[in-house]
Amino acid sequence: MRLLSTLALLLTATLLPAQDFDFKGVPADYAITFATASSRGLKISDSPEAKAFKARLEKLVAGLDKSGKDSKAVQAAIKNATGLDFESPDNRYAGGFSMGKDGSTTGSIIIRALHDSAKLAAHAKAKNVPTLQAGAAKGWKIKELISSVSDELAEAANNFPAPPAEASGMSEDFGVFDVDNNTLVIAQPKEAARIIGLLKGQGASYALPSAQRSAVAATGRAYAIVSVNAAKLPASAELANSGFVSGLFAMGEKGSDQVMRLSATFTSKEKAAPLAMQAQGMLAMAPMMLAGDPSKPETPEEKEMKALAGEFLAGIQPVEASGNQVTLTAKWDTLKLYGIIEKIVTIGASKMKDMPQPTKK
């Protein structure tokens, strides 16, 4: 599971300027969409400080769990099988999903990363990975393909919980479809065929609304965004009564700071007001919640965690309410943010070492 967490972090750590987010291939009817951009030149992930920070964290994790020591070997195995380097600063991701009234979901991920198509095909054939077909495009079942790369990935794939097919509508297997040496599509076959068509210009792909593009640009050099379009969500009385129109999450780098922006748009100023009040109230209450119970003694560890939480909260600015839009902005100095994360991981590592180890049979 540690490996899956690492892969998730890699997905959110690949970064480009806001105007370069590439949604080509992402269906326009998705309710929730996301994109990342190249991290090349960004302090948060492509700098000497970032690399030193990552090395320190890897050392901490490796001291807790043997799987941490195997992460480099896993990455090497992936590169050997596919030619894909997950740590490349030029990797980018896009995708999203839609939801039906019956609770079913349809989604996909487009990986824009240099890899070796011939090497991937040869590996899949040698390992007898089951194939899938998306129109004229050939792919492989994702669980079996992941499992074929290394023992650790096989264990992670087998332990990863899958939603019941009848509840999710995902009766088909997900596959990895190799479009070209720079593009992989992860989706069910029917959806993959639609996405591959969009990538070839057969239809209109999703486009970030202009209002959201300006909000993304406010974060500086944006590197990750998630957009929500309420009109594409399943209709409900609750959604209609809320007046919610759209939402946006964006992360970017401005100078030496990391900037986060959360915004929500409603049908009117009156519909936006309750959220603005609730958000501001929660921010006002946060310091009081950190104060705790003065009648109970605190351990040094608890005091440090409260101090770290205080540092994190200090970066969150007051809620802005402008007409029918509510916006929350946060800003943290990159090196200070590294320090907060590293201290939290160190405290967590210390606690895990002190926990009783399971008895080996």
Image: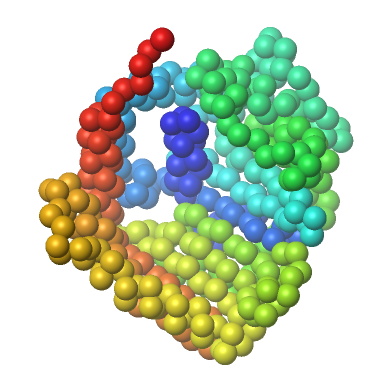
| Picture layout, residue 99 above or below residue 11 | below
Q: How many numbered marks have been drawn onto this rendered protein structure?
A: 0
State the residue at coordinates (59%, 85%): 271
- Tell whether 85 sits left or right of 241: left
Residue 239 pos. (x, y %):
68, 73
- Does residue 90 appear in the picture of this structure? no
- Tell whether 264 sits left or right of 71: right
As rendered, which of 313 and 87 lies closer to the eye?
A: 313
As rendered, which of 336 and 314 lies closer to the eye?
A: 314
Residue 257 pos. (x, y %):
30, 60
| Picture layout, residue 120 above or below residue 263 | above
- Tell whether 241 sits left or right of 191: left
State the residue at coordinates (73%, 25%): 140
| Picture layout, residue 189 above or below residue 73 | below
Tell me the colour scheme of the image: rainbow
Residue 251 pos. (x, y %):
44, 59
- Does residue 67 appear in the picture of this structure? yes
Quarter in which the C terminus is drawn: top left
Q: Quadrant of residue 178?
A: top right
Residue 253 pos. (x, y %):
38, 59
State the residue at coordinates (44%, 45%): 13
State the residue at coordinates (40%, 22%): 67
State the residue lying farthest toward the front. 295
Q: Quadrant of residue 32?
A: bottom right
Q: In which quarter of the image is residue 132?
A: top right
State the residue lying farthest toward the right. 135
As rendered, which of 49 and 246 lies closer to the eye?
A: 246
